[in-house]
Amino acid sequence: MAAFKHPQILLASDLRDGEVLFLAETGWVRDHRLAQVARDAAAAAALESRGKAELAANKVVDVYLADVEIDAGGAPQPLHYREKARVVGPSVRRDLGKQAREPEEAR
Amino acid sequence: MNAHDQNHAARPNAPTTTYLYDSYDAAFVKARVEEFRTQVARRLDGSLTEDEFRPLRLMNGLYLQLHAYMLRVAIPYGTLTARQMRRLADIADKWDKGYGHFTTRQNLQYNWPKLVDVPDILGALAEVEMHAIQTSGNCIRNVTADQFAGVATDEYEDPRPTAEFLRQWSSLHPEFSFLPRKFKIAVTGAAHDRAAIKFHDIGLRLRADDAGAPGYEVIVGGGLGRSPFVGKTVRDFLPRADLLAFLEAILRVYNRFGRRDNKYKARIKILVHETGLDELKAQIEAEFAAMDRAPFAYDAEEFARIAGFFAPPPYEVLPAGSPALEQARRDDPAFDAFAASNVAPHKVPGYAIVTVSLKPEGGIPGDATSEQMRILAAASERFGFGELRVSHAQNIVLPHVKQDELQALWRMLAAAGLATPNVGLITDIISCPGLDYCALATARSIPIAQAISRRFADVDRQREIGELGIKISGCINACGHHHIGAIGILGLEKRGQESYQITLGGDPTLQASIGELLGPGVGAELVADTIERLVDLYLAERRPGERFIDAWRRIGHARFKEALAREGEHGADI
């Protein structure tokens, strides 16, 4: 197992529409700021285990952990630009991505 | 003998130059839709796992990308009817987000379909004789062709009957449904290659032998991606009668010897490279000699049936030139710019080929809104026998427009934002979707294309620069054909940031060449600056009439590298 360097959240895609989802304590959410954060390797493994169970239950697909940092407001923000893109939507045609239905401050 | 209705005739009011399904084709595609409908239902109720479902959805063109599913619709050899284009628009409105993306393989992609809707989308496509079969997966993909097929002045023979013949042979071919990797075939019948046949797994160039009999030069093992190769000729001349059997032999050799242990070495180009051309040719010829060729015997009647669908439309007899066109060009500089870059000569006197650019200033290359698709459909009906083509350069072609009507067509297109006069110029950029949509991408492509498009927006400046192809890929898979751009741009990840390598000297034509790397990658914010410096050097050094690619060949790669390195000393991380 790779060394645990950063807090992590769990991402997946919704089986029905393919939209990116984040695992929160209450279940899957579409706002990454609400995602449950794993702050050590054991918590990350538990998060991944929950996600794989959801995968096996055919609720989501493409489950994986991503490194985050915690912003001033206490919300997780991805470190890698790939996941940064996934949380806000495409950087082009922003009128059509998920950012179009979110408040401005969330973009 | 085959399953098709040999007496099947074109329906009334249908375009005369497009293959039309008979009852066999229609039943086949409809059955496939219903099969996928049950597969989706079984996936949603949990009867199928994702591992079981993935190959099934991929065989039907359905990917899972970063933000949503993506459906890739096949546009056989890039030919569309107005009715089909309207249906693509309707699907975009009903099940997607009001637009579609035309790709470098002459297909169309929807970026936002929901899995639950895809069976209905496929059903709507089937109603207009379209599908998404074999637009993904390790099978023979949509056969592509010259977008000027049947109308080019330099054409020996229309490649579309051959492409359709191959489509029917390769569709659900039981032996080739699980190849080592995907397999792409392109066909041209012209002297100037507009289909990049030397960069496909198989490229076919229609030609005649010394006696005038029709056949093909067969080129194998071209490709881009991680390891780009120019295809190599395995037969200078293959008689038409041997076409299916010989391609069957090539695919069998590839299926048997192609590597399955490493997906990055699984394409036939690697087999050609590792085996050696002479040995591979010997293997193909041995298979061809030994195989039972009876099932693949040339069916001249069937080929003629297919070719009959591509008969020329009912052209009027017109003089070669158009005084009205010449006058309009003199009177209207904007129309003149369009006519200079977007209009090509037609083999029939009085007609012209119009390429509609899907590359407006700052736009997304290849994107068209549903409203633009409907206008293109209407324009094709009003001015061009209801036929459209998609080019691998991500533009739309109206192949039969009267020269006298070019200005009226231009006005119609201009009102819809479809008259950008830049075909073949520096802002006619090929770009893959990149990291904005694609799960494989390592960097964004579209914003780079937009930045370059805005930087060179001035039409007069573009015309002064002249023919220059910029091609951008967001990962090493090279869907944006960066290896064969006169200027190629490849987006990669470097130390956690998007970084762009630039290559020079790529050429997709029969003079085929693969671009050479300029140096280490640059950040996104520096790409347009770097391109501008390359262009400035070209403008300073070129001889009269010399294109960028020709100047680069004459001056040499080192000269461009040196010039940029000197610039880099003043701050740019080049």
Image (cartoon, coloured by chain):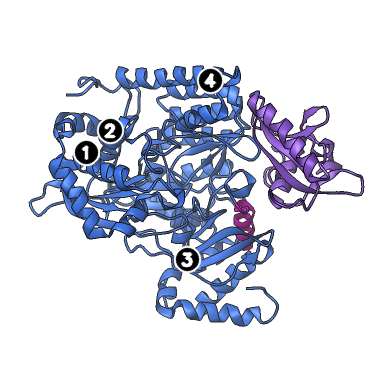
Q: Tag 3, which secondary structure? A: loop
Instruction: Judge from the rendering whether residue A58 lies leftward or rightward of residue B427; answer left or right.
Output: right
Q: Residues within 10 Å of mark 3 (few under 14, many from 20)?
A: some
Circle 2 marks a residue in which chain? B
**Upstream in sequence: badge 3 or badge 1:** 1
Q: Amino acid at mark 4?
A: Asp
Query: Which mark, by number, is residue B120?
Result: 4
Q: Amino acid at mark 2?
A: Trp
Which label lies toward us, 3 or 1?
1
Asked if marks 3 and 1 touch (Cβ < 8 Å), the reply is no
Query: Which mark, by number, is residue B169?
Result: 2
Instruction: Specify whether residue B454 is painted magenta.
Output: yes
**Upstream in sequence: badge 1 or badge 2:** 2
The residue wearing badge 1 is B244
Q: If the image is split into quadrants, where does the C terminus of chain B sit?
A: bottom right
**Upstream in sequence: badge 1 or badge 4:** 4
Query: Which mark, by number, is residue B274?
Result: none
Asked if marks 1 and 2 touch (Cβ < 8 Å), the reply is yes
Instruction: Judge from the rendering whether residue B222 lies leftward or rightward of residue B539; answer left or right.
Output: left
Residue under the image location 48 percent in, 33 percent down: B58
The residue wearing badge 3 is B466
Q: Amino acid at mark 1?
A: Leu
Residue B76 lies in quadrant: top left
**Upstream in sequence: badge 3 or badge 2:** 2
Q: Position of residue B149 (x, y in %)?
A: 31, 44
The span picked out in magenta is: B442-455
